[in-house]
Image: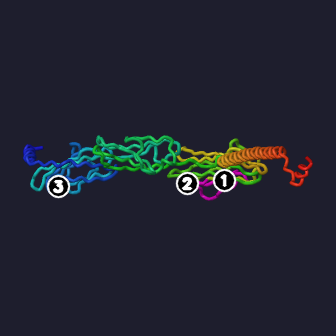
Amino acid sequence: MSSSKTLLWFTFALFLTVKEAKVEYSKIKDTVTLDCGDADFNKEYEWKYNDARIIQMGTRGLPKKGNIALARKAKLNGVKLIIPSLELSDSGKYSCIGLTPNNQLTIQEHQIYVVTASVSPSDTVLTSNNVTLKCEVGGGSTAQAQWIKPPGFEPYGRPENTVTLSSVTPAEAGIWTCQVTDNGGSVVKKMEVGITVIGPLTSPWETVAPLGGSVELSCFLPTLGNLQIVGGGWSRNPPGNIHLPTLSTNLKRLYWDKTNVSSRVTFSHEELSTNFSVTLSKLEVDDTGVYVCTVVLEGEKSLKTVTNLKVTVGQEFMLSPISCAFVAILTAWVILIVLISIIAVKHYCKMYNRFSYLKAHCERLQNERMAEFSPPLPRSQYRAEHYLY
């Protein structure tokens, strides 16, 4: 810079006005527009990032960009600086130095903190796997991050930037929020990330069906998300004489492959999505066993579920655990009532016998007492006896 220009800036510095720095928290990939305070568009001004030049506008109206990476994407709108597609590294101090219409030197500063939230290894995860949530605030910020969990939007654990969810379940799926709070306790930014939990495959643990009848081997996937199913199917453990269908894809559409499938097995011929149930008919005793439903997703990820098939002969049936508990409780009540009734009857009989004995005893005493005293003679007999004497 020439000595005359240095002298000019020194003269302006005598009338320097420094505006209070503006603090902003911005989301990653957002676009921010920074103002240059009272600087005059028609006069010379310069934008800096942490004391490195971004862009300088001379009196001739020709911009001169700096050598930093930020300068290549920054744009001017008058004296305002526009920064598109923010990155975490764009956090820092931005300064605009210019002249007011009264030729007074003015400096406007902005402190930008870029906030980002992410899920790893992916926002779509299989059930029972681990997920890490990370919330970052660039620029050396001392702000605290608190994760808010769905569906009740309650704080998850203590404030920290990174949390790990172990063995996730569908209950933990949904929108998680990173809430950023500054040193004053004010919420300055919220970032949201979504978690999709795939699985588990669901099927009844045990299925009972009569000999010669039919049964549905149920297999259902509650949520698929954005993952694609690339294979899978039904199998029996141990393998038997019955051949079950497998899943195949055709132009990214999912169907049952009916090649070499036993005639006793029926299934849908339509495009499949989340229901992978099949029906087994004309049941035989040898069909009893463990049946496994497998779904293979892209990335060599797979889900499995098993159901135990029991083929019964005659009228055999099984009660569910709840039904068994109900029957046991009802039986206990019946036994208790019967015992109470027996005790009551025995007590009644005992009391009745005691009462009968007392009644008979009283009658016997009364008869004995009456026998001790003879009844008086009639008057006629009494006179005859008197004259005889």
* Amino acid on which disc 1 is placed: Val
User: Any magenta on residue 229?
Assistant: no
Circle 1 packing at 10 Å, graded few (<14), some (14-19), many (20+), is some
Which stretch did the figure color magenta? 254-275
Q: Give the mark nearer the N terminus: 1 vs 2.
A: 2
Label 1 to label 3, Cα distance in Å? 75 Å
Label 2 to label 3, Cα distance in Å? 57 Å
Residue 144 coordinates in the image, percent (x, y):
33, 43
Pick whichever, 176 or 39, lies toward us.
176
Helix, strand or loop status at disc 1: strand
User: Any magenta on residue 269?
Assistant: yes
Helix, strand or loop status at disc 2: loop
Q: Which mark is residue 252?
A: 2
Between tags 2 and 3, which lies in front? 2
Q: Give the mark nearer the N terminus: 2 vs 3.
A: 3
Q: Is residue 287 visible?
A: no
Between tags 1 and 2, which lies in front? 1
Helix, strand or loop status at disc 3: loop
Residue 335 coordinates in the image, percent (x, y):
71, 45
Name the image quarter holding the N terminus.
Answer: top left
Question: Which residue lies under the disc numbered 3?
Answer: 61
Residue 59 coordinates in the image, percent (x, y):
14, 53
* Amino acid on which disc 3 is placed: Gly
